[in-house]
Image (tube, helix red, strand yellow):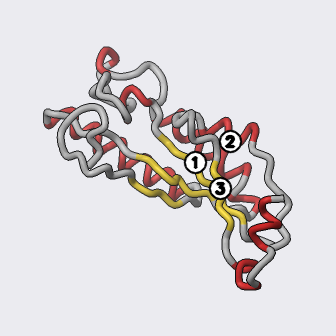
Amino acid sequence: MATSFCRCRPCHRRQQCNPLLGYQRLLHKPNLTIKHLQLPTDPAQDRLLISVHYYDPATFALEDKFTEWGHTGTPSKKENWGDEEHLEKIFVALRTAYVEKGIPVYIGEMGCVHRNNNRSEAFRKYYLEYVCKAARTNGMAVFYWDNGNAGAGRECSG
């Protein structure tokens, strides 16, 4: 119903894209979008977009509880889930569920908080690079979240 309302007037709205937000409240759960989002019927053909956020694992990307990420991280300094394999699995699932069916997906928000030492910053940069490359490989665009806070630690994504 909302999609039909958005398309009703003026006529150029039939040509605009209509972004659908995935389940953003659980920022690190884009798989909930795949599992539960029901696509509306859109009178305009090929104009729906899907948007999700990606902050897995949140204890690394949103907080500074862990200082390392990925297969080369020290086990005691990284989360025990959410590495490259996890990211690939989610992005392939998004591609299969939507992109391959002609529905574009974009990561409407992603990022990783700054750390206060060079080693941790190297893991942060690797995380950001890996997310961006994996998204591109799976046909998705990425928007980096920058809140302007250039410090280090929680909520420092500037």
Which residue is the site of mark 3? 50
On the rendered structure, is 59 left or right of 123? right
Query: Residue 66: percent from the left, percent from the top?
Result: 31, 23
Among numbered discs 3 and 2, the one appearing first in the sequence: 2
Viewer-nearest residue: 89 or 64: 64
| Residue 5 lies in quadrant | bottom right
Viewer-nearest residue: 140 or 38: 38
Q: Number of marks in the image?
A: 3
| Residue type for callout 3 | Ile
Among numbered discs 2 and 1, the one appearing first in the sequence: 2
Residue at (37, 34) in percent of width and height: 62
Which residue is the site of mark 1? 52
Q: Could you say whether the residue bearing mark 3 is in a helix, strand or loop? A: strand
Q: Are marks 3 and 1 in contact (CB under 8 Å)?
A: yes
Dot 2 crowding, Cα within 10 Å, few <14, some 14–19, many 20+? some
Viewer-nearest residue: 97 or 13: 13
Spot the residue most to the left: 117
Residue at (15, 33) in percent of width and height: 116
Residue at (43, 30) in percent of width and height: 58
Q: Are marks 3 and 2 in contact (CB under 8 Å)?
A: yes
| Residue type for callout 1 | Val
- Classify 27 as above or below 15: above
| Residue type for callout 2 | Thr
- Classify 58 as above or below 87: above
- Classify 92 as above or below 123: below
Query: Residue 125: percent from the left, percent from the top?
Result: 28, 45
Q: Are marks 2 and 1 in contact (CB under 8 Å)?
A: yes
| Residue 49 lies in quadrant | bottom right
Residue at (14, 37) in percent of width and height: 118
Which residue is the site of mark 2? 33
